[in-house]
Image (spheres, coloured by chain):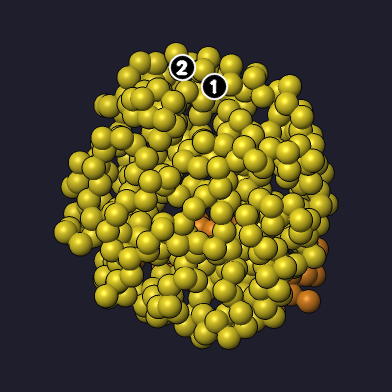
Amino acid sequence: MNYRPYLLLAELTYACPLHCPYCSNPIEYPGGRELSTAEWRRVLEEASQMGVLHVGFSGGEPLRRADLAELVAAACAAGLYTNLITSAVGLQSQRAAQLRQAGLDSIQISFQSDQETLANQIAGTSAHAIKLRAAKIVRDLGFPLTVNVVLHRGNIGRIAQIISLAEDLGAERIELANAQYYGWAFQNRAALLPTRSQIAQATEVVGAQKERLLGQMEILFVTPDYYSERPKPCMNGWGSRFLTVNPGGDVLPCPTASSIKGMRFENVRTHPLEWIWNQSESFNRFRGTEWMPSPCCECPMREIDFGGCRCQAALITGDANATDPACALSPYRETLTSFVDSIQQRPETIPSFAADIGRLLFRQSPIRTERPK
Amino acid sequence: MISMDPQSRPMLARGVRIRNDPITGEPVLLFPEGVLPLDATAHDIISRCSGESTVESIVQSLAEEYEIGIDTVRGDVCECLVQLRDRMLIAIAQ
């Protein structure tokens, strides 16, 4: 197995105007200053020299960084493909044109639903109309557009209408990504996890819509691993193809890895990116198969799913080395199964999401965002 | 699956680029959500997708270059293009 980074996720800030209760950002924000423009420029150059070909600018909301266009231009100069992953709040015509000018290749906009009221309820703010306007600006400027919708019990029933929205917006692709239950989403999972029948219905709708939109719009649909027998091949293997640099400069093998208690990650302020990728303990910790416990170490799937997700193993079992509890062979699978069973009786229509809202923990931005000097 | 019209003119879809991977020296396709390393055949096909050549002329040019039967080449080219089009990596010039 060769370990070679292709994609960098550059999380520029944790600040975000949205409060989605399924946010994958950490619940406890690590302290420290955000990386400065000069520090990000160095990270982008180092990434390119290591073989990274593609960078996603994300957050939080990357548009909150006034130097975003400058960083896009730096990434382009380093030969990287640049994708902006945004809520689109703050993406007015002038800003979008500035990003186009800087060389930005593509834009992914998140939507919370096709219906304004529900979308704004989920986002915890009135953002839906802004997103619609921004999507039009993006298309008028000639950017390719990806629509991303995180699915959960409150919106999965509207999957056909959500696909129609993306179609109307002229998107090349739509990512229908079921919430992954870490961080904020884990706190809210009893209200967010779709029921078994919702997943079955959604799968059927997606199948038909994929057929209908073949060659016009790509539909990517990821079902929640709580309902699967096998774990997901998380990040295509730890430290294998992806790296994330978070707002404070910590380098992570996956965007949620900082949730693993007891693990220490290196920082771009103290080490070169290449050293972190090749030499650091954190990046080598779950490479290969040596670290695997039973049943992973004797499993014929061990080099296909890599034992699943380390963050989920740590979250559910308390041990980051354990087999991902989404796997039917995990001794902890029963804890997920009994949770899944416990939510099947809950009401699953949209009004119930509104009823659930009082129980949801909405994502908060860091109270004090330290700006680089 | 819809097959490819032999008279259609395929081109790289919006936001899709080919570049050489500086590490391997091999061509890769870059697109909004990722990177796709290309094998030699896929590269030969995609690099002919200019929006000007028809599918049929791409098939003919490859059959001459590879010196193999045109029907075999046509099958391979159409299969490759359909897969790329389904992933929105190739578009049809209007």
* Nearest to the observer: residue A326 or residue A46: A326
Pointer 1: what residue? A336
- Residue occupying the point 34% across, 44% down: A258
Q: Is residue A203 left or right of residue B73?
A: right
Asked whether residue A4 is in view, the answer is no
Label 2 element class: loop
Q: Position of residue A314 (x, y in %)?
A: 38, 29
Type of amino acid under label 1: Leu
Pointer 2: what residue? A332
- Residue occupying the point 25% across, 47% down: A265
Colour displayed for chain A in the image of the structure: yellow
Is there CB contact under 8 Å for labels 2 and 1?
Answer: yes
- Residue occupying the point 60% across, 40% down: A360
Classed neighbour count for the residue bearing mark 1: other residues with Cα under 10 Å, few (<14), some (14–19), many (≥20) = some
- Counting every numbered tag in the picture gives 2
Q: Position of residue A2 (x, y in %)?
A: 31, 45
Q: Is residue A352 above or below residue A121?
A: above
- Residue occupying the point 55% across, 82% down: A95
Type of amino acid under label 2: Tyr
Colour displayed for chain B in the image of the structure: orange
Asked whether residue A190 is in view, the answer is yes
> Gap between marks 2 and 1, in whole Å?
7 Å
* Nearest to the observer: residue A347 or residue A247: A347
Q: Is residue A62 above or below residue A347?
A: below
